[in-house]
Image (spheres, helix red, strand yellow):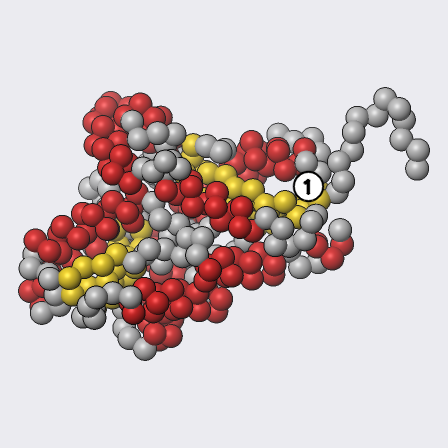
Amino acid sequence: MLIPADHPPIPARKIGVLLTNLGTPDGPDAKSVKRYLGEFLSDKRVVEIPAIAWQPILRGIILNTRPKKSAHAYGLVWSEEGSPLAAITRRQSQALQGAFGEGVLVDYAMRYGNPAIADRLIALKDAGCERILIAPLYPQYCAATTATANDKAFAALAGMRWQPAIRTLPPYHDDPAYIAALKTQVEMQIAALEFVPDAVIASFHGMPKRTLQLGDPYHCHCQKTARLLGEAMGRELVVAFQSRFGPAKWLGPATDETLEALPAKGVRKVAVIAPGFSADCLETLEELAIRGRESFMTAGGTDFAYLPCLNDGAPGMAMLRTLIARELAGWVADT
């Protein structure tokens, strides 16, 4: 087939994989955090209150008080690579580059902040990706995480005249590859400790209790992950939920209250894991590793360890290669 001389260049047909995660401010300063929180807390999937009632509260109180406090917390975990969440997700995408063949490009994006989902989808399309797997890195499905990341991608597709074919990565809370990766990493981490934990706490990000009543499977997914991991490790895990916000009733028990109560029950040595997070972030490195430690030790604990997420370590990357290769089945063979 002859191509006219004035025809725009046509890139070779490719497949794209777009890893997506929650997001992060551009810097650990109040202005950047305010911009980030404004986007995050304006998402109707995150705050399910009518905008006419919520926005005055958000703009009038929260965004004028919380950014400074949050910026301080971000400053405690920021590195030369920037935000831990963005840096780790970037390394995950880099480690997967070439893992599925030369015709598969791997990129990453954030639901809130940068790099933006819409921008990276357009970049993949411009690079010749006619089929794209959107991969939200949330093991447990939640409307406020998985769904909103997909919403943002679909909104970007709505503005494209020539849309690529799309698949999305399902939640993997009970996938044998995920449970095996968690077991391998957690057992290695515990073996490296200088103490034997009396209890292992699995801390998941909290959600308002009403989300469970409305049919969101998140709570059930978290419980199943903890049960399967506990069975694989041969020990029961203590399940708790962190990051409460506002006056609404949240899923419980709360992680901070659990840590404060354990020493009085004779549990003075604990290890904390965060199996709901695919990459370490503010909620794990500051809320758990720093404030969680302070709460537990102040209450009478003697030994505390926060065990990092799967991140871009060998067990986690092997798991991601397995999950993504499964979802690309048929596509890769057709290129």
x and y percent of residue 113 in the render? Answer: 43, 32
Up/down of 145 relative to 184, above or below:
above
The answer to whether residue 227 is visible is: no
* Side of 269 relative to 87 (left or right): left
* Side of 100 relative to 270 (left or right): right
- The residue at 36%/32% (across/down) is 25
x and y percent of residue 198 in the render? Answer: 18, 70
Which residue in the structure is indicated by mark 1?
A: 129
- The residue at 67%/59% (across/down) is 329
**SS under mark 1:** strand
- The residue at 90%/26% (across/down) is 4
Q: Is 25 or 87 nearer to us in this picture?
A: 87
* Side of 231 relative to 91 (left or right): left
Up/down of 19 relative to 304, above or below:
above
* Side of 243 relative to 332 (left or right): left
The answer to whether residue 118 is visible is: yes
Can you say which quadrant of the picture contains the N terminus?
top right
Residue 254 picture quarter: bottom left
Extreme-bottom residue of the structure = 234
Up/down of 136 relative to 226, above or below:
above
Extreme-right residue of the structure = 2
Q: Please state which amino acid type lies under the numbered disc 1.
A: Cys
x and y percent of residue 59 in the render? Answer: 28, 24
Q: Residues within 10 Å of mark 1 (few under 14, many from 20)?
A: many
- Say how many tags the image has: 1
- The residue at 84%/25% (across/down) is 7
x and y percent of residue 291 in the render? Answer: 18, 47
Q: Is 31 or 78 nearer to us in this picture?
A: 78
